[in-house]
């Protein structure tokens, strides 16, 4: 069997020469070290020798530790994660945390600054062409998240006479905002799994679905089983571990969707605890990109990889080759078959 290796030659004066060659032997070379070899050896006393030193490293070993991976495209989804814009509860909670207990913050809606943040993100989404790529918008069924979702990913201003329902009617949730059209926008689906921490804080208690439907006519609420909010309780706040577990259930559910490019508009606590389960096998900088708290109206785009064969969709872009049939053995395979 022929193996391929990189040869690192540390020359007098500190320069490095790299060459690649193969060795036909079942025995491994004597000087095998994990890559990245130059980083390890340049900080080793061996580099201070006055004679050239040669070390060998298998290319496959280098690839395995380089921090890069390849996955089939059809086993991935692109998620565009968004935290809602500034709500009235954010303002009051900043003044005093006890304000989160106030009934006046029930189902908190966006502030004027929050709507400005929505407009800024909407402009960014259109400048980079993201609005043309998103196939589905998943939204937590609370005023502030639905206002953010339709404001960022919805159509242009609603026009009377067009036979489609608006995503949001005029002045929905004390917004003083014009109606938002559903024309040329992806479908919007409300999902309870991506709600904020449940319980105690009235700002996280939703209205009945029958109240939401006339305000957001084009949002699909069919996946929500109960008209009333039976998940929120006045005396028990949902634990972080339960939010994280709920987040994993939500991600598993996303794999049942056929869409590959999905926007999710949710909440700081839900996003943080859901994503904290990921990135432990990454560089700390990458981990921090995944697992830090979201700012109001922040967007992060991530590739979601199916490592556990959960995805069932066949590959769309793959092509089997060998059409029409014929000999196609690569030279190295042919050498093994016909030595």
Image (tube, rainbow, N blue to C red):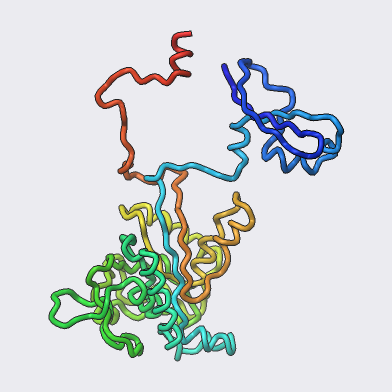
In the rendered image of this protein, does residue 71 appear above or below residue 133?
Answer: above
**For this view, does 108 lie left or right of residue 171?**
right
Residue 96: horizontal and vertical position, in percent? 59, 88
Q: Point out the residue furthest to the top here.
A: 339
In the rendered image of this protein, does residue 37 appear above or below residue 23?
Answer: below
Count of numbered labels shown in the rendering: 0
Q: Residue at x 56, y 69 (%)?
A: 293
**For this view, does 190 lie left or right of residue 235?**
left
Q: Residue at x 48, y 71 (%)?
A: 298
Residue 254: horizontal and vertical position, in percent? 38, 56
- Looking at the picture, tell me which residue is in the foreground, 109 or 40: 40
Residue 181: horizontal and vertical position, in percent? 24, 76
Give the position of the N terminus as an image quadrant: top right
In the rendered image of this protein, does residue 315 appear above or below residue 3?
Answer: below
Q: Residue at x 33, y 17 (%)?
A: 327
User: Dividing the picture into quarters, in which one does residue 119 lie?
Assistant: bottom left
In the rendered image of this protein, does residue 131 appear above or below residue 48?
Answer: below
User: Dividing the picture into quarters, in which one does residue 65 lie?
Assistant: top right
- Looking at the picture, tell me which residue is in the foreground, 198 or 281: 281
- Looking at the picture, tell me which residue is in the foreground, 154 or 216: 154
Residue 106: horizontal and vertical position, in percent? 43, 85
User: Dividing the picture into quarters, in which one does residue 39 lie?
Assistant: top right
Q: Residue at x 33, y 66 (%)?
A: 131
Residue 249 visible (yes or no):
yes
Residue 210 visible (yes or no):
no
- Looking at the picture, tell me which residue is in the foreground, 74 or 270: 74
């Amino acid at each position: 069997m022929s193996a391929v290796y990189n040869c690192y030659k540390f020359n007098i004066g500190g320069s490095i020469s790299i060459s690649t060659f193969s060795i036909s032997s079942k025995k491994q070379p004597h000087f095998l070290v994990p890559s990245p070899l130059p980083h390890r050896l340049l900080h080793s006393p061996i580099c201070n020798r006055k004679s050239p030193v040669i070390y060998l490293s298998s290319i496959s070993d280098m690839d395995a530790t380089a921090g890069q991976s390849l996955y089939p495209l059809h086993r991935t989804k692109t998620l565009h994660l968004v935290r809602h814009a500034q709500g009235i509860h954010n303002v009051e909670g900043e003044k005093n945390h006890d304000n989160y207990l106030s009934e006046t913050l029930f189902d908190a809606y966006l502030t004027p600054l929050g709507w400005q943040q929505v407009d800024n993100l909407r402009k960014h989404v259109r400048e980079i062409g993201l609005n043309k790529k998103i196939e589905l918008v998943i939204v937590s069924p609370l005023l502030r998240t639905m206002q953010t979702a339709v404001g960022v990913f919805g159509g242009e201003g609603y026009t009377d006479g067009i036979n489609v329902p608006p995503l949001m009617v005029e002045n929905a949730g004390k917004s003083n905002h014009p109606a938002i059209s559903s024309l040329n926008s992806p479908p919007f689906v409300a999902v309870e799994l991506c709600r904020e921490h449940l319980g105690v804080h009235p700002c996280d208690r939703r209205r009945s679905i029958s109240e939401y439907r006339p305000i957001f006519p084009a949002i699909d609420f069919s996946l929500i089983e109960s008209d009333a909010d039976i998940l929120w309780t006045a005396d028990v706040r949902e634990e972080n571990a339960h939010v994280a577990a709920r987040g994993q259930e939500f991600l598993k559910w996303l794999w049942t969707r056929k869409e590959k490019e999905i926007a999710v508009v949710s909440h700081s606590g839900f996003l943080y605890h859901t994503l904290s389960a990921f990135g432990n096998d990454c560089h700390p900088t990458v981990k921090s990109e995944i697992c830090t708290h979201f700012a109001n109206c922040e967007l992060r785009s991530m590739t979601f990889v199916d490592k556990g064969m959960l995805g069932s969709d066949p590959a769309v872009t793959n092509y089997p080759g060998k059409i029409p049939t014929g000999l196609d053995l690569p030279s190295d395979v042919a050498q093994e078959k016909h030595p």
